[in-house]
Amino acid sequence: MIGLFAYYAGWIANYLTKIGPLIKATITLDNDSREAIDLIKQNLANAALRPINESMPFTVETDASDFVIAATLNQEGRPVAFLSRTLSPSEQRHSTVEKDAYAVVEALRKWRHLLTERHFTLVTDQKSVSFMFDNRHTSKIKNDKIACWQLELMTFSYTVIHRPGVENVGPDALTRVHCGYMGKHQLRDLHISLCHPGVTRMSQFVRVKNLPFSMSEIRTITSQCEECQQIKPQFICSDEEKLIKATQPFERLSLDFKGPLPSVTKNRSWLNTKGVSTSRTTSYNSRGNGQCEKYNGVIWKAIECALKSRRLPLGHWENVLLDALHSIRSLLCTSTNCTPHERMFHHSRRSTNGTSIPSWLKPGPIYVKRHVRNKDEPLVDEAELLETNPAYAHVRLNDGRETTVSVRDISPRNSTSRAEFSNRGPSEDCSGGQLSKEDATVRDVTIATSTEEGNNEGSQPNIDREISPLRRSTRVRKAVDRYGAVSYY
């Protein structure tokens, strides 16, 4: 939001004075910060309500994200109108190029009454969209949806300009504000689905799943959770006492019962007959079985928070018990620095909450899909992955340019060692399929040749290139015997 205010700072009187309380604000906004936001919004609204200069051209700036499209209508740098809305579930499945193109179409539809029969400037941060919507280019577009939109935009007179995302501040700030609002609700839903964990356990889950939430957002959601404030007590530091630690799973079990329940047999000797030594604690003395008592309290607090967030009475505790146990077993235990599931089974537990990034998606060499190419050009480009999130990746191409691409358009580029090829059988290809005897021979000869070349040049063989040569047809074309007939042998 501060970026949007700074973009239109020239139209906000005494901007530095008004933005001061907002810059000094911490995680939660105080009354001064809220008043500053309302005052700056009012100044922007007043600037947009001024009369339009008929002699000055308009500028339409657009941007799109995974969930939001946004646009601004400016005149000489002055805001005239704003547009932002959430994409529907079907629209969210569109490609990145289609979303940016749709942002342009929606903006021109919204402000058609102002842009018709006027020449204006159209600004987008998607280079492909600027090329396809440029009226000077007459190349055929294979995407039917974008082709229909291009046909619709032919009724307007405009000059399209490509502007990098870091410079497209106005609409980018609108998408970020909208996405931040949605992200806050998504983080809140995740906090509820995990049965209201604390800051440490919540942040560990977000970090393991590579979710796009910051530590400050986690603290804000946790501290503002109404259910947690009502049910969870304040932490009290007790005296340090030594506990009997187990050296392996199920070496020592601590049990606590819900009761008392009526008993007929009154058998207390069954465990002794099974070789299990037992000890008792005095009644009404929670310290005697402190770990078990504490864990029962943790489970019951998770059940109460889950019931309250779902607005269920206490009698429905069995409906949320499995979710509470799943959350506790899947989240970090600060005393052991791992989850109870990892402590028991030595691997992390699968969870239906959150989305994770594939393990291969880490900084290093990758392939990037080439969308615009000739038939003789390769399908992919070599690049280096710098950083990523579940949706987008920031990459550096071989020519030094850095850009942002969709995660769906990249693939790993790992060098395969010769040991992997030597371990495969003579009739097994790289993907585990079966090769013919002739193909296996050709593959072995190719690998041997590339190995010798690598040894002669003092470098490793280039395993990334094609291992087997292209196989061409062995058919020979004969002369035409008669009109319309061609024979092969």
Image (tube, rainbow, N blue to C red):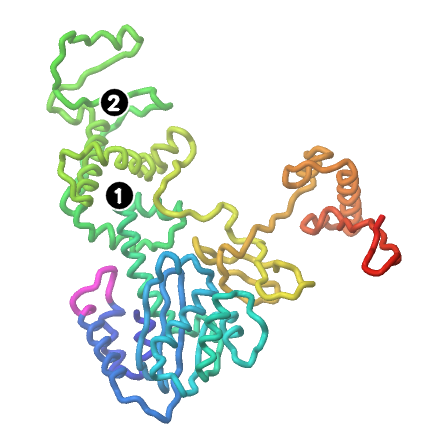
Mark 2, residue position: 254
Q: Residues within 10 Å of mark 2 (few under 14, many from 20)?
A: few
Residue at coordinates 49% horizontally, 59% vertically from top-left? 406
Number of callouts in the render?
2
Query: 34 or 350: nearer the eye?
Result: 350
Q: CA distance from mark 1 to mark 2?
A: 24 Å
Image quadrant in which you'd find residue 425: top right
Mark 1, residue position: 197
Q: Is residue 216 above or below residue 46?
A: above
Q: Secondary structure at mark 1?
A: loop
Q: Point out residue 450 in the picture as x, y percentages from the top left corner.
A: 77, 47
163 lies left or right of 106 = right
368 lies left or right of 17 = right
Q: Residues within 10 Å of mark 1 (few under 14, many from 20)?
A: many
Q: Point out residue 300 in the picture as x, y percentages from the top left corner.
A: 19, 34
User: Which numbered circle lies on residue 152?
Assistant: none
Q: Secondary structure at mark 2?
A: loop
149 lies left or right of 285 = right
Closer mark to the observer between disc 1 and disc 2: 1
- Which of the two discs, 1 and 2, labels the residue nearer the N terminus? 1
Residue at coordinates 19% horizontally, 39% vertically from top-left? 237
| Amino acid tagged 1 | Pro
Magenta segment boundaries in residue numbering? 25-34
Query: 421 or 131: nearer the eye?
Result: 131
Residue 460 in view in this figure: no
